[in-house]
Amino acid sequence: MTLVEIKKKTDSILDKNFQMKYRRLQEDFLWILTNKEKLRTEYSNKYIAVENKEVKCTDDTIDGIIAKIKRSKRQVEDFAIEYIGECPANLLF
């Protein structure tokens, strides 16, 4: 196998891994959106980190939740992170 063939194969594998991660993050953000009211009752005014449609950790600040994720030896980009406000957001047009 030539170096060019190895690079193409590696790029293909990396692309598939990226697509899988991206799809999972989309699913997690959709899960957060769909369950926002339920999450608000338990995690009001908190940041939540969701992985595989499950809240893995929470904190009062974005810096705090990032620190918790890093302490667990995980990558921040593996989590859907969202602030759960006390009240639903209103959009002004």
Image: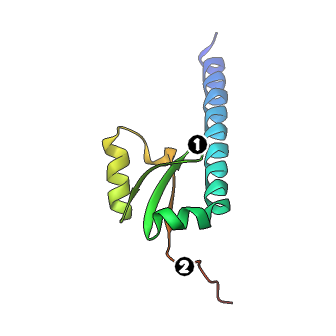
- Quarter that holds the C terminus: bottom right
Residue 14: give x, y in percent of width and height: 60, 31
**Which x, y percent locates residue 2?**
63, 13
Q: How crowded is mark 1: few (under 14 residues within 10 Å), some or many (20 or more)?
A: some
Q: Is residue 69 above or below residue 92?
A: above
Please state the horizontal and vertical placement of residue 9, each as a whole percent of the image: 65, 22
Residue identified by numbered label 1: 52
Q: Residue at x 60, y 40 (%)?
A: 21
**Which one is nearer the viewer's eye here, 43 or 11?**
43
Q: Quadrant of the N terminus?
A: top right
Query: Which secondary structure, mark 2?
Result: loop
Left or right of 62 on screen, residue 9: right
Residue that badge 2 annotates: 87
Residue at 65% x, 89% y is 92
Which badge, 2 or 1, comes first in the chain's sequence?
A: 1
For residue 67, above or below residue 33: above
Relative horizontal placement of residue 67, taking residue 76 as reference (left or right): left
For this orientation, the residue located farthest to the bottom is: 93
Question: Residue flagged by tag 1: what amino acid is it?
Answer: Asn
| Front tag of 2 and 1 | 2
Task: Work out whether 62 lies above or below 72.
Answer: below
Give the residue at x 49% y 76%.
Answer: 86
